[in-house]
Amino acid sequence: MKIHDTGFPGLYAFEPKVFGDERGYFLESYRASIFKELGLNPEFVQDNESSSRRGALRGMHFQKPPHAQGKLLRVVVGAIYDVVVDVRVGSPTYGKWYGIELSQENKMSIYVPEGFAHGFVCLQDGSIVQYKCTDYYNPSSEGGLPWNDPGIGIDWPLTDVILSEKDKHYKNLAEFESPFTWSP
C-alpha cells in the first residue's frame, strides 16, 4: 500500500495495490500494521455507508470530545471530492483544508483523525461511500463548519450543491471555539 503524506499531521491518504485479472480485482483496504508504523492505533467500532446523487454535499462535520471520531473513508461506487479542515488549536495546519478525489477508479482511501471537520461532494450519481469510525455516532456531540466558509476558502469542484438543513446553519471558523487541541 502506498502512503500519501498530506502535509497535515496525522492525516494520510492510501493507495492500495490492486491485483487484477480476467476475474476482476483484489485489494487490501486496511492493514493495522501500516497504521501502527505511522504512529496511529485506531480502534474502529462502527462502519457506515452512504449513497448520494451528484451535487450532494455532506459536511463539514465532526463530533466533539468525548465522542470525537477518527474515520477511514473510501468510495466503492462512483466518485467524490473529499475535504477536511484542521480544527485542532495549536496545529501548524489549523484552519487549512486538504482535498482529494476518492473514486471507484482510483480506489484510494483517507484516514481523517479526530480534530478535523470532514465533508465531501458527490461527483457522480449513485456514489457509495463506506467509512469506519473510532467512536459511535452521538447526536449530542455533533458539530460542523459551513462548506463555503470564506475564511477557509475551500476550492470545491462543484458549487451548485444540495445541502441538508442542518448543514446550512454552522458558524464560520472565525466565530468557532474549537473543542480540539493539537499535541505533537
Image (cartoon, rainbow, N blue to C red):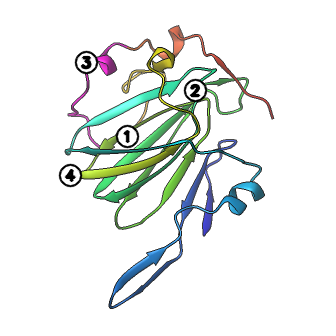
- Disc 1 residue type (three-letter): Phe
Label 2 element class: loop
Q: In this view, does 28 lie to the left or right of 8?
A: left
Crowding at mark 4 (Cα within 10 Å: few <14, some 14-19, many 20+): some
Task: Please tell me whether mark 4 sits on a helix, a strand or a loop.
Answer: loop
Check disc 3 and give the amino acid type.
Glu
Q: Where is residue 70 in the image (x, y as percent from the top left)?
A: 58, 38
Q: Do the residues labelled 4 and 2 touch (CB within 8 Å)?
A: no
Q: How far apart are marks 1 and 3 (CA)?
A: 16 Å
**Marks 2 & 3, CB-CB < 8 Å contact:** no
- Type of the residue with mark 2: Gly
Whichever of callouts 1 and 3 sits on the residue coming sooner in the sequence is 1
Q: Mark 1 points at which residue?
A: 120
160 magenta-colored = yes
Residues shaded magenta:
157-169
Marks 2 and 3 sit apart, C-alpha to C-alpha, by 24 Å
Q: Specify whether residue 162 is painted magenta.
A: yes
Which label belongs to residue 126? 4
Q: Note whether 8 is above or below 93 in the view shown.
A: below
Q: Are marks 4 and 3 in contact (CB under 8 Å)?
A: no
Decide if residue 74 is on the left or right side of residue 96.
left
Task: Examine the image and state in which quarter residue 45 appears.
Answer: top right
Which residue is depicted at the point 65% across and 44% down? Answer: 43
Q: How far apart are marks 2 and 1 (CA)?
A: 17 Å
Q: Mark 3 points at which residue?
A: 165
Which marked residue is nearer to the observer: mark 4 or mark 1? 4
Q: Nearer the viewer, mark 2 or mark 3?
A: 3
Above or below, comparing residue 68 to residue 158 in the picture: above
Residue tagged 2: 95
Give the structural element (helix, strand or loop) at label 3: loop
